[in-house]
Image (cartoon, helix red, strand yellow):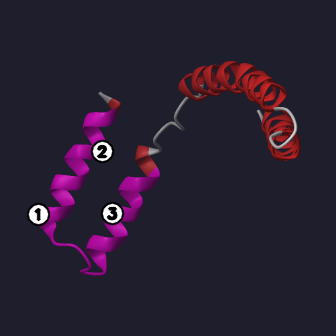
Amino acid sequence: MKVLSIIGIVLFTLTFLMIFGLVPEDSDSAAILGLLSMLYAIPFSIIALVVSSRRKKQPVNVHEQLLQLGELKEKNIISEYEFDQKKEKLLSKIK
């Protein structure tokens, strides 16, 4: 993904500069360059969407979070009621 992003930034910058350089002389060439850059942008956007949807979320470490909740309760940062609510919520994730 990083390589595609770098290619996209370079291509966009070059196209942007070329379009502004060509507009006063040849607006058709500027339009063609714009379309060519879109031919890269659309597949890149689709690839980025597919890759981001395939990334898995990190598994929740319920044990560590329960220990942290217990420490918060011992220090009286959260109440017994809040502890029980958060504990139930965490335990429901592993069921």
**Residue on which the image places disc 2:** 90
Asked whether, in this view, residue 51 is left or right of residue 57, the answer is right
Q: Give the extent of the magenta segment.
A: 64-93
Residue 25 location in percent, x, y? 87, 38
Residue 73 colored magenta? Answer: yes
Q: Is residue 76 above or below residue 59?
A: below
Q: Residue at x 76, y 23 (%)?
A: 40
Q: Is residue 30 above or below residue 24?
A: above
Q: Residue furthest left?
A: 81
- The amino acid type found where label 1 is placed reads Tyr
Q: Residue at x 40, y 59 (%)?
A: 67
On residue 81, which mark appears? 1
Residue 42 location in percent, x, y? 65, 22
Label 3 residue SS: helix
Quadrant location of residue 84? Answer: bottom left
Q: CA distance from mark 2 to mark 3?
A: 10 Å
Residue 72 location in percent, x, y? 32, 72
Label 1 residue SS: helix
- Callouts 2 and 3 close, C-beta under 8 Å: yes
Count residues near mark 2 (Cα–Cα under 10 Å), then give few for <14, some for 14-19, many for 20+. some
Label 2 residue SS: helix
Q: Earlier in the sequence, mark 2 or mark 3?
A: 3
- The amino acid type found where label 3 is placed reads Leu
Q: CA distance from mark 2 to mark 1?
A: 14 Å
Q: Residue furthest front?
A: 25
Q: Residue at x 24, y 80 (%)?
A: 76
Magenta stretch, main secondary structure class: helix
Quadrant location of residue 68? Answer: bottom left
**Residue on which the image places disc 3:** 69
Q: Residue at x 45, y 41 (%)?
A: 60
Count residues near mark 1 (Cα–Cα under 10 Å), then give few for <14, some for 14-19, many for 20+. few
